[in-house]
Amino acid sequence: MAIEWDDVRVFQSAVRAGDYSTAARKLDMDRTTVGRRFARLERATGRSLWEQASAGYRPTEAGRAVLRAAAAMERAMARLDRDLAPAGDRIGGPIRVAGTAGLAALLLPAFGAFLDRHPAVSLEVVGARDAIAAIQQRQADVGLAIARTKPRDLAGERIGGFGQALFARRGADPARAVVWGHAMMLANPQPWARLNAKDDAGRCVEVDGIAALHDAVRAGLGRAWLWERLAARDPALERLPGTAPAAAAADIWVVHRADLQVEPAVAALIEAMPGILAGSFEGEG
């Protein structure tokens, strides 16, 4: 049995609304029709898409897969509308962007080309230690997350690697360590962050973001595991012996909520994000 796109849209609306009745009103359908469409989608997928939890109903893992596909289709339609719109019709509105450990602020210069293409867009960089939590808590529309895998309850895609290597300032004493502060480690207890966790040695400088970590090492305050792609371009730094364990490998993901409507401006930024990341190292966005 083929999956009908209209049934996927009804399911997406039901998840966003929280129940059949609210979705029915928004879709201008009766509740029975919404339930029938929902049942037909479950028959077509052969999977249960909805389950009851302590806080109410929520999508199952299969349901989240359907939501991710729906979000991708929504972005594609927003892109098509944008491509076919008359030259005078611009996308616009505010976009809130969060980046793990200040990653979004670090890449901010490369957002210029995107803002030039879409002058009606306003951009807000949300201070966040964990972009995934910022998206889940609806503090941001788009997140740049450092993670080994994409969170299963969010939509998004991998846009680059986050490999780390040990660096110090050329000629500086590398005995002192530059480490993540306590709040940063609480927000990101993953292996990639634990490379720069504070130990019992005592001699350290604590920071709370990727830019500050890099700047502290560049200033000769100590050694740290830095984003290799960034640090390798800095002539003031030298790489020290040592290889990060395989468990510390991570990627950069652009993520957003799968259960919320993707606005045209947000869809455009998600599409542009791989170029923004590349532009941070190539001088173009």
Image (tube, rainbow, N blue to C red):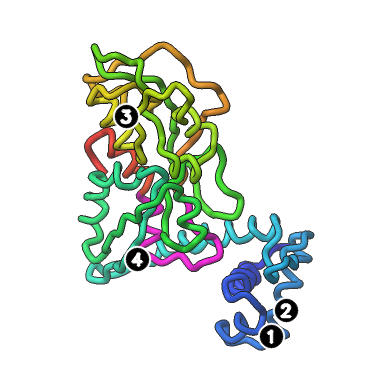
Direction from residue 198 to residue 57 in the image, left or right: right
Mark 2 or 3, which is nearer the eye? Answer: 3
Residue type, numbered disc 1: Arg
Q: Magenta stretch? A: 255-272
- Quadrant of the frame with the C terminus: top left
Kindly report the distance in space between the C-alpha atoms of the residues bearing marks 1 and 2. Answer: 6 Å
What x and y, as percent, mark residue 43? 78, 66
Image: 281 above or below 274: above
Identify the residue under disc 3.
Answer: 230
What x and y, as percent, mark residue 12? 60, 69
Asked if the residue under mark 4 is in contact with the one under mark 3, i.e. CB atoms within 8 Å, the reply is no
Kindly report the distance in space between the C-alpha atoms of the residues bearing marks 3 and 4. Answer: 38 Å
Give the SS element for disc 4.
helix
How many numbered marks, from 0 up? 4
- Of residue 14 and residue 195, the one placed in the foreground of this image is 195
Residue type, numbered disc 3: Leu
Please tell me the numbered disc located at residue 84: 4
What x and y, as percent, mark residue 158? 48, 42
Kindly report the distance in space between the C-alpha atoms of the residues bearing marks 3 and 1. Answer: 54 Å
Give the SS element for disc 1.
helix
- Of residue 224 and residue 6, the one placed in the foreground of this image is 224
Residue drawn at the location 22% of the way across and 50% of the way down: 112
Precedes in sequence: disc 3 or disc 1: 1
Residue 216, quarter of picture: top left
- Of residue 58 and residue 240, the one placed in the foreground of this image is 240
Asked if residue 131 lies in the magenta stretch, the reply is: no
Is residue 83 visible from the viewing direction of this image? no
Identify the residue under disc 1.
Answer: 31
